[in-house]
Amino acid sequence: MRILVVEDDPDLNQQLCAAFEEAGYVVDKAFDGEEGHFLGDTEPYDAVVLDIGLPVKDGISILEEWRREGRDMPVLLLTARDRWSDKVQGIDAGADDYVAKPFHMEEVLARLRALVRRAAGHASNAIEIGPLRLDIGANKVTLDGASIKLTSHEYRLLSYLMHHNGKVISRTELTEHLYDQDFDRDSNTIEVFVGRLRKKLPDGLIETVRGLGYKLSAE
Amino acid sequence: MTKSVSIFTRIFVATAICLVIGLGATAWALSMVYARALERNIDNVIESQSDQLIGSILDEDDPEDWAFQDIDPRYQELGSGWYWQITNIEGQPLATSQSTFGVDVPDLEAPFDEQNRRRADVRDADGILQRVSERKLFTQNGNYRVLVTANWDELNSDVALFRNQTILALSAVGIVLALLAAFIARLSLGPMKELREEIGRVKNAEAEQIEGIYPHEVAPVKNELNALLSTNKEIVRQAQNHVGNLAHGLKTPLAVLRNEARAKQQIESSMVRTQLSRMEDIVQRYLQRAQMAARSQLQTQHTPLNPAIDLLLAAMRKIHHPIAYHWSGTQTERPLSVRMDAGDLDEVLGNILDNAGKWASTEVRISCQFTGERVEITIEDDGDGVPHQKLKTIAERGHRLDESTQGSGLGLDIVKELVQLSGGQVKFDCPKDSGLAVCLTLPCRLG
C-alpha cells in the first residue's frame, strides 16, 4: 500500500512516515502544497495524509483540485483547527476523514487503515480469502489459523492482493503501489516476491493471468 | 460620585423657574398699571366733584339756593367713605353730601399750597383710609372751603382683587405652559431615549450596532458609538485570532513531541508524556475560552437548521461509515433558524452526532419538534447506551465514559456550555435502556 504524506513540519512528517513504514506502508512525502498536489495528481496512492495548513497551497485547495480532476484516493486530513465547522468544510471539500492535532499516532494509523480498507470495499478489519486471513490492525497473516512468517515486502504484496482480491492486478500496478517513487520500475523484483509468496501459500492461490498480471482467488 | 440631574428635570425646572419669575413680574406690573389707572380715576372723580361744588357755589349768591349734584352715587351712600363738605373759612359746615350724615369728615393738617389746595391720605374715625382734597374759595359773597374725599381702601381692595385674579389666571397659564414645556422636553429628548434603548439592545447582545434614524444633533453620537463598537469588535476578533493562532500553532510541535515521547519508550518519557498531556489540555482549554468569550459577545445570529444538519450528516456518513443517519428535515412550512452562530451550531450538533456515530450499532435517528419559540432536536443511537447513574456526569469537563475510544472528554462539555449560552437546554436519556438519546432544546424562529 502506497501512502502520500503532505505535512510541512519536517519532524512531524518524518514521524508520520516512520510510523507508516513501520506499519507496512510504502510512503512518499511532500513538504508543501505544490509538491503534494503534484505527487497526488501523478502517482497512484492508496491513501493520502494531508495537512490543511501548508505553505504555497493549502490542503483544502489541493483536495478540491484533486477531486475536480477525478482523483478519488481516500484522504485523511490533519488539522490543528478542530471545530466541527472546519471538519465539515474539509469533508465537504472531499476528505474522507480527519484527525485533529495533536494526535496519537495509533489513531492516525487506525483511521488510515480503515480508509484503505473501505476504499477497497471491505467492511471489517480482517480480510478472509479461503484459508487466508489478513488482520489489518495487527499486520498479521494467518493460514488456517496459523501465523505465516512474511518479510515486509512479502507482507505488502500479499496485503495489496488481499485488499483487491478477485481483481487482476498488473505488475505495473503492484510496482506503483508497493514501492516509492524512486524505485526502478523495470526490475523484476515483483516476480521474485510472487515466487517466494507462492512457496508459503497453498498452490493456485496466486494465479498468473497471462499478459495481464496476478489475481488472488480462493476458488 | 453623585447622580447627575436628568436633562428632562433640568429643562423642566429651568422652564418652571422662568415661568414663575416671568409670570410673577407680569402679575406685579399689571397690578401696578391697574392701581395707577384706578388712582387717576379716583383723583378725577374728586376733582370733578370739587369743580361741581364750586360751580354751584358760584352760581348762587345765597347759600340757601345752592343746588349740588353728585358726580358719583357713592356720595349719597351713608358711611361710604365718599364725602364732600362745604364750610366757611373757619371750618363751620354749610353743606355736606348725604353720605356724610353722622360722620366726622377728616381734618387735614397739611398747609394749603399757592393755589389754595391741599390733599392727603388720612384714616377717618371709622378706620377708612381716605384721599382728601380741600380747596379754598374766595367769592364776593364770602369765603369757603370745599372738601371732597374718596374711599382709598376701596381702591386698595380693588387692586388686591385684581392682583389675586391676575395671579390665579397667570398661574393657570403657568401650569399649562409648564405642561407644554414638559411635553416639548419629552419630545425633544425622544431621540435620546431611543438611543438609550438601542445601546441597551447592544449591551444585551440583541443587536450588533445602533440602528435608527436620528436628528443631526444626535446622529454624530450614534455614528461615533457605532465606530467604537466596530473597533472594539475588531480588536476582540484580532485578539481571539491571535489566541487561536497561538494555540493552533502549538498543536503541531505538541504532536511531534508526543510522538517522539511515544517512540522512545524510556522511563523518563512517561513524565514527558504527562507534561505533554497537561500542555495539550491547557492549549485546548484556552482556545475554547477564547472562542467562548467571542460567543458571549453576541447572540443575535440565527442559523438555518436544515442545511447545517444536512452538511454535518454528509460528513458523519463518511466518517462513521457504515452507520446510517436518518433525518427527515424540520417539517416546517418555512425554514427553521436556530438562535446560534453557524460555527457554534456545527459544534453542538457535530459533537452529538459524532458521539452517536461512535457508539451506534447500525443507525442514528435525528428528529425535531417545533413548538413556536423553541425547537426540540432529539438524536438517538442504537448502541449500548449509558447506565442511568452515569447520565448526570456525562457532560462534565474531561469526563470520559469510555477511555478506549479517542477523545478528550471535552465534546459534551462544550455542547453544554454553548447550548446554555444560547438560552437552550440539553438533556441525556436512555429511553429504552439501550442507546443514548440527547435532547436539545434551542431558541428558534421561522424564516
Image (cartoon, helix red, strand yellow):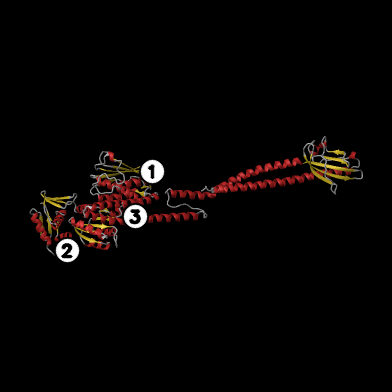
Q: Secondary structure at mark 1?
A: loop
Seen at 18% across and 64% down, the residue is A182
Above or below, comparing residue A184 to residue B170 in the picture: below
* Cα distance between the residues tagged 2 and 1: 65 Å
Amino acid type of the residue that numbered disc 2 sits on in the rendered structure: Phe
- Residue A90, position as x, y percentages in the image: 29, 55
Q: Give the residue at mark 3.
A: B244
Q: Is residue B380 visible?
A: yes
Q: Secondary structure at mark 2?
A: loop
- Number of callouts in the render? 3
Amino acid type of the residue that numbered disc 3 sits on in the rendered structure: Gly
- Residue B334, position as x, y percentages in the image: 36, 47
Q: Are marks 3 and 1 in contact (CB under 8 Å)?
A: no
Mark 3 burial class by Cα count in 10 Å: few <14, some 14-19, many 20+: many
| Pointer 1 chain | B
Frontmost of labels 2 and 1 is: 2
In the image, is A151 to the left or to the right of B100? left
- Residue B297, position as x, y percentages in the image: 40, 50
Frontmost of labels 2 and 3 is: 3
Q: Are marks 2 and 3 on the same chain?
A: no
Mark 1 burial class by Cα count in 10 Å: few <14, some 14-19, many 20+: few
Q: Residue furthest right?
A: B140
Amino acid type of the residue that numbered disc 1 sits on in the rendered structure: Glu
- Residue A41, position as x, y percentages in the image: 23, 61
Q: Secondary structure at mark 3?
A: helix
Name the image quarter holding residue B47.
Answer: top right
Q: Are marks 2 and 1 on the same chain?
A: no
| Pointer 2 chain | A
In the image shown, does B259 or B148 lie closer to the viewer?
B259
What's the mark number on residue B373?
1
* Cα distance between the residues tagged 2 and 3: 42 Å
* Cα distance between the residues tagged 3 and 1: 34 Å
